[in-house]
């Protein structure tokens, strides 16, 4: 057919037209992806504007959250978001590192794939399922924690109060399980980019498996590991439904980790549909804009680090 | 103890802890599934799939919620899938190394991990405020925006895997790029692209946060796209946090249904990918 195309000018013109249409369609679709991010940023800023103009900087520094008197400050949700995410990472990083080591350096070939898939499936379980599960499980675990850790000096202060089952600690715990598959997947991938020659030189010098991991693989993969951890942080910061279930939605900063708190995303999920008054809903959108800003910077930094790593892998290959 | 023994013991301890970490990960997957099955199975009966969501205390099922979830997921993937595929095609075939495409790739990666509640707020501002009320259509659009970056990514990856020789052969016969893409590259990458769509469906069918302010919920049967529509995730959210035992039971059963369908989708997508992998190597 194509030999005809060269002879018949009308056919060739038709082909060229279709080419132009198809090419433009793919370009437009690509621009849509680009425009989406811009659209999200603009619409959030526009929605947040009334609240930001009214409260100015005090929006960021005040703990008060009172729909009746229309006084809103974001300090408690910001605090809750940061505390739950950091605690979750502290719990998740060692476990993720262990899983990545197991999958790349220890597991035999037949074990690698099923175990890897099972861990990945943890990431496929929807957030709301983690919420309902966390709520169920913590009713049984928390009384036990208070009974055993509460009387201890210093750390005992973190485990005081009645066993609501919900609170900051529960949220961090559930978040940790949720980000483990993301962090361990990235760590596994960067561990696999370590050249075999490097590991073999380590073993050749008489190093044990652990020494090779700690002194050869980890230093080589450091940038990628940090990228993976920040990707996990981005997940934890923005995670909504699971946290909404278990954090208790209380706009205050408590000293006990067992006390109810709130996060940015949980406040939005809990209150947005019930928010009456423009200032109230605008304050919630301002929270959303804040969350967008924080997660965007974290994710962008993570992607940037992973991207640089990819370039290095390509140039050395 | 001499140095050698200490090194050996450290090695055993560290590797043992790594094994333990993996066991912890697997344990939680098992624990979640076990809790869901134990609490959810009790409520599974024919009524679950044939009756509407009940008022507190009454008996009923999840039919309207299941229907709403399926409708919004399908519309979401019908909007997000093609746009994602076209954008992925642009990145892989038309502008692999251009400056614009590296920006788009970066933006797509950010969208891929952006919090879904932000997407919900965006669609709320974009559609719900303009239309004046919550609607199933707004919910579907929110889901489409979440499905899109997943499809862009997988499509680009899959198209890149098609051997350059096949593309060159088509070009050498005088075919325009669109012809090469639609008649040679798409068929060669078909199962990979389908897998990507499958993963996107798995991703959006459990999403709750973006539906809260878009589709909202509806206690009754509704097939009107311009009105609020019931959907499994939001029903689970409301019922699980309610004080009524019959609602809580339905929430568990709904959670079981949704998790099992997503696990089946994800596992089958991976099976397809694995068979592609080994097919490519031989």
Image (cartoon, rainbow, N blue to C red):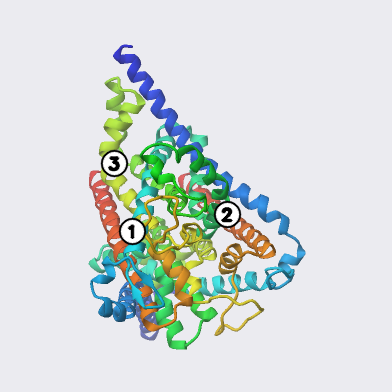
- Under circle 2, the secondary element is helix
> What residue appears at the point 41 percent right and 61 percent down from the top-left corner?
A262
Query: Which element carries disc 1, helix, strand or loop?
Result: helix
Per the image, the residue denoted by label 1 is: A79
Give neighbour class at mark 2: few <14, some 14-19, many 20+ (Cα, 10 Å): some
**Is residue A290 placed above or below B38 in the rendered structure?**
below
- For the residues labelled 3 and 2, the Cα–Cα distance comes to 31 Å
Contact? badges 3 and 1 (CB < 8 Å): no
Q: Residue at x 42, y 51 (%)?
A: A172
* 2 vs 1, front mark: 1
- Is residue B218 left or right of B119 when viewed as pictured? right
Q: Are marks 3 and 2 on the same chain?
A: no
| Image mark for residue B263 | 2
Residue drawn at (63%, 71%), measured in percent from left and top? B65
Chain to which mark 2 belongs: B
**Mark in front: 3 vs 1:** 1
- The N terminus of chain B is located in which quarter? top left
Report which quarter residue A208 is drawn in: top left
Q: CA distance from mark 3 to mark 1?
A: 31 Å
The answer, for residue A198, to whether it is visible in the render is no
In this view, A87 is above or below B258: above
Query: Label 1 is found on which chain of the structure?
Result: A
Task: Provide residue A198's location: percent of width, then percent of height.
Answer: 27, 32
Subunit under mark 3? A
Which class describes the residues within 10 Å of circle 1: few (<14), some (14-19), or many (20+)?
A: some
Tag of residue A221: 3
In the image, B42 versus B26, the foreground residue is B42
**Residue A154 visible in this rendered orientation of the protein:** yes
Q: For numbered disc 3, what is the local secondary structure? A: loop
A33 is higher (above) or lower (below) than A125:
below
Q: Is residue B78 above or below residue B248?
A: below
Q: Are marks 2 and 1 in contact (CB under 8 Å)?
A: no
């Amino acid at each position: 057919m194509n030999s005809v195309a060269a002879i018949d000018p009308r056919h060739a013109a038709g082909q060229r037209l279709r080419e132009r249409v198809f090419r433009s369609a793919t370009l437009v679709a690509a621009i849509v992806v680009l425009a989406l991010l811009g659209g999200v940023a603009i619409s959030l800023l526009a929605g947040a504007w009334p609240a930001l103009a009214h409260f100015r900087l005090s929006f960021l520094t005040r703990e008060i959250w009172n729909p009746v008197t229309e006084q809103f400050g974001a300090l408690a949700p910001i605090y809750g978001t940061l505390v739950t995410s950091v605690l979750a990472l502290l719990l998740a990083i060692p476990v993720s590192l262990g899983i990545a080591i197991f999958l790349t350096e220890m597991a035999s070939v037949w074990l690698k794939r099923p175990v890897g898939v099972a861990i990945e499936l943890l990431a496929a379980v929807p957030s709301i399922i983690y919420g309902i599960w966390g709520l169920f499980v913590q009713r049984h675990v928390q009384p036990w924690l208070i009974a055993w850790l509460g009387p201890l000096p210093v750390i005992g202060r973190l485990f005081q109060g009645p066993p609501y089952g919900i609170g900051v600690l529960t949220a961090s715990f559930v978040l940790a399980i949720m980000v483990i598959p993301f962090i361990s997947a990235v760590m596994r991938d960067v561990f696999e980019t370590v050249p075999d020659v490097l590991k073999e030189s380590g073993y050749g010098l008489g190093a044990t498996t652990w020494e090779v991991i700690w002194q050869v693989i980890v230093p080589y993969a450091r940038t990628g590991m940090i990228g993976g951890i920040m990707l996990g942080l981005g997940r934890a910061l923005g995670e909504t439904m699971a946290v909404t279930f278990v954090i208790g939605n209380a706009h205050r900063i408590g000293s006990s980790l067992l006390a109810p708190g709130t996060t940015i995303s949980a406040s939005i999920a809990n209150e947005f549909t019930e928010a009456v008054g423009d200032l109230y809903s605008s304050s919630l959108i301002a929270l959303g804009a804040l969350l967008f800003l924080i997660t965007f910077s974290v994710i962008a930094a993570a992607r940037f680090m992973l991207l640089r790593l990819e370039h290095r892998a390509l140039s050395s290959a | 103890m001499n140095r050698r023994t200490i090194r050996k013991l450290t090695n055993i301890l560290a590797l043992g802890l790594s094994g333990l970490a993996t066991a912890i990960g697997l344990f939680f997957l098992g624990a979640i599934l076990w809790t869901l099955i134990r609490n959810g199975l009790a409520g599974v009966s024919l009524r679950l799939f044939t009756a509407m969501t009940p008022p507190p205390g009454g008996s009923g099922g999840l039919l309207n919620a299941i229907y709403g979830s399926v409708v919004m997921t399908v519309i979401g993937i019908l909007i997000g899938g093609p746009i994602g595929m076209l954008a992925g095609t642009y990145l892989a075939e038309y502008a692999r190394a251009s400056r614009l495409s590296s920006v788009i790739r970066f933006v797509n990666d950010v969208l891929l991990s952006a919090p879904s509640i932000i997407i919900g707020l965006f669609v709320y501002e974009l559609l719900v405020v303009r239309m004046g009320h919550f609607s199933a259509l707004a919910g579907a659009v929110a889901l489409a925006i979440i499905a899109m970056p997943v499809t862009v990514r997988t499509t680009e990856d899959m198209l890149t895997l098609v051997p350059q020789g096949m593309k060159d052969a088509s070009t050498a016969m005088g075919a325009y790029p669109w012809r090469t893409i639609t008649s040679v590259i798409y068929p060669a990458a078909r199962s990979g692209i389908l897998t990507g769509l499958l993963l996107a469906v798995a991703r959006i069918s459990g999403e709750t946060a973006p539906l809260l302010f878009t589709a909202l919920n509806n206690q009754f049967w509704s097939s009107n796209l311009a009105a609020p529509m019931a959907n499994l995730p939001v029903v689970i959210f409301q019922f699980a946090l309610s004080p009524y035992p019959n609602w809580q039971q339905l929430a568990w059963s709904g959670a079981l249904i949704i998790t099992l369908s997503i696990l089946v989708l994800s596992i089958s997508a991976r099976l397809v990918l694995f068979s592609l992998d080994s097919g490519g190597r031989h």
